[in-house]
Image (cartoon, rainbow, N blue to C red):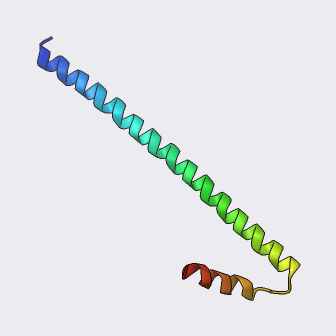
């Protein structure tokens, strides 16, 4: 086997290994981000529900709060 063919095979192996490593890392990162966002939304919903139960603010709270958060 000549050196050029071996180099090309080694290159393809390296390329495929690195490509798979990049994809798997991106996938794990996306999962971690999604878990954090879901946790955040759950916590926000819980806090809103608790506040609505403690006070008499009613459903208007969500509308006003969402508008205020958009303009922050």
Q: In this view, does 45 lie to the left or right of 20?
A: right
Q: Count the marks: how many? A: 0
- Which residue is at the far front? 72
Placement of 4 over or under 12, stated as above or below: above
Q: Position of residue 30 (x, y in %)?
A: 51, 50
Q: Position of residue 68 (x, y in %)?
A: 61, 83
Question: What residue lies at 67% left-to-right and 86% top-to-bottom?
Answer: 63
Placement of 58 over or under 48, stated as above or below: below
Question: What residue lies at 73% left-to-right and 69% top-to-bottom?
Answer: 45
Question: What residue lies at 36% left-to-right and 30% top-to-bottom?
Answer: 17
The part of the image, by quadrant, that contains residue 6 is top left
Q: Quadrant of the C terminus?
A: bottom right
Q: Where is residue 16 in the image (x, y as percent from the top left)?
A: 32, 32
The part of the image, by quadrant, that contains residue 66 is bottom right
Q: Quadrant of the N terminus?
A: top left
Q: Position of residue 25 (x, y in %)?
A: 46, 40
Closer-to-camera residue (46/71): 71
Placement of 29 over or under 68, stated as above or below: above
The part of the image, by quadrant, that contains residue 42 is bottom right
Q: Is residue 25 left or right of residue 6?
A: right
């Amino acid at each position: 086997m000549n050196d050029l063919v071996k180099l090309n095979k080694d290159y393809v192996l390296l390329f495929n290994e690195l490509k798979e490593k990049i994809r798997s890392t991106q996938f794990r990162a996306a999962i971690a981000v999604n878990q954090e966002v879901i946790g955040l939304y759950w916590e926000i919903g819980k806090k809103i529900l608790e506040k609505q139960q403690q006070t008499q603010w009613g459903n208007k709270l969500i509308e006003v709060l969402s508008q205020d958060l958009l303009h922050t």
